[in-house]
Amino acid sequence: MKKIKVFGLLMLVLVMAFTMTACGTTEEKVEATTAGNTEAQAATEAVTEAEKLSGQVIVDGSGTVYPLMAHIAEMYMTTAQPGVSVQVGRAGSSAGLKKFIPGELDFADASRAIKDEEIAQLEERGLKMGENVIEIKLALDGLTMVINKDNTWATEMTKEEIVNMYLSGTYNEDDKVLWSDIRADWPAEEVKFFGPNENHGTYEFFYEVILKKADMVKTANLQQEYSTLVDLVSKDKNAIAFFGFGYYVNNQDKLVAVKVDFGNGPVAPTLDTIGEDLAYAGFTRPVFTYLNADYARERAQVLDYAMFVVSPEGAAKLAGENGFAPLPASVYEAYAQQLEALK
């Protein structure tokens, strides 16, 4: 009996020892797993926190580019970085670059390329194109001639007719041009000329590229706001104006776009015809934004926004929705690589 009791007691001790060891092992595993999960969660939270940005990004410049850049900014703040405030202005291409050169802006939008004299002003401040300032081509725009809905005669014009009617002195010294001066069977009523003023790259493109820097008709009424131009043309049967295709797209209910004959028949501006090698090439131009690369190196939100602009979710996706023809994906990808090197 004593042997049995001793044996039983020994077995009980062994079982208890095994149980304690097992429990210890299980607890260690639970503690290790918990610690591992905590560390993983902390690492995830750290990454998430690192990706959250704040601060401001300041953009100003082209009124033509404004709808596209404003849409990109809206999507960025909604889907990517709600903690960043992107402020987009529309002072005009020249006005925007005047602010950009002394360092007041992170980005300057322009509906024409930066000029040699503006590059010289940047260099005076020690800023070099490609190093301190990066030119980003956003999309392609089609300069669009628009007329009143009740104008049934000038829906198709040749490029030469458009140029000549806007040139000072083509028909008479006082530049009071009649529609019948352009074509004899058109009404003998005075043409009312409208367009954006000198602050806008659209004016500069029209004056420098289309009119070859010749004087514009003295009777042209030039405005700062594109909405004003839309209103003026929509209320005057004899009005004609020029601006970017996007503003026409957003006001098709009020205006008619003139089909332009560049030599091979009348062509309407559309996303299928606007392009440097397409049917509307004669009135096609690239639009840009200029980035202060020094600010992008210094402030994470500026670089992050620039990366979003050239991402598949930026200009590539939103250009068409705002009346611009997007560029090939390879162009945006090349900009992304250039920006990546700023990190």
Image (tube, rainbow, N blue to C red):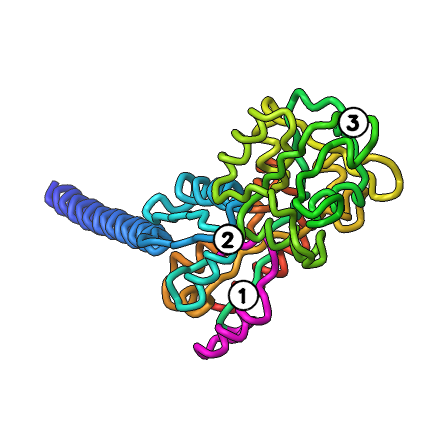
Residue marked by disc 3 = 186
| Residue 63 falls left or right of residue 244 | left
In the orientation shown, which residue stands out farthest toward the right? Answer: 264
Snapshot quadrant of residue 196 = top right
Q: Is residue 278 left or right of residue 146?
A: right
Camera-side mark, 3 or 2: 3
Rate crowding at label 3 as few (under 14), some (14 to 19) or many (20 or more) other CA atoms within 10 Å: some
Q: Nearer the viewer, residue 144 or 104?
A: 144
Q: Amino acid at mark 2?
A: Asn
Pinpoint residue 138: horizontal percent, then vertical percent.
59, 52
* Residue at the far left in the pictured view: 2
- Residue drawn at (38%, 46%), measured in percent from left and top? 81
Amino acid at pointer 3: Trp
Mark 3–mark 2 Cα distance, whole angstroms, equals: 33 Å
Judging from the image, what secondary structure is the residue with disc 1 in? strand
SS class, disc 2: loop
Give the residues in magenta. 108-131
- Residue 155, by quadrant, is top right
- Front residue of 271 and 147: 147
N-terminal of the pair, mark 1 or mark 3, is 1
Position in image of residue 297 (x %, y %): 42, 68
Residue depicted at x 44% and y 56%: 304
Which image quarter holds the N terminus?
Answer: top left
Earlier sequence position, callout 1 versus callout 2: 1
- From the viewer's side, name the closer residue of 65 and 136: 65
Q: Which residue in the structure is indicated by mark 2?
A: 199
Q: Which residue bears the numbered disc 1?
A: 134
Is residue 163 shown left or right of residue 83? right
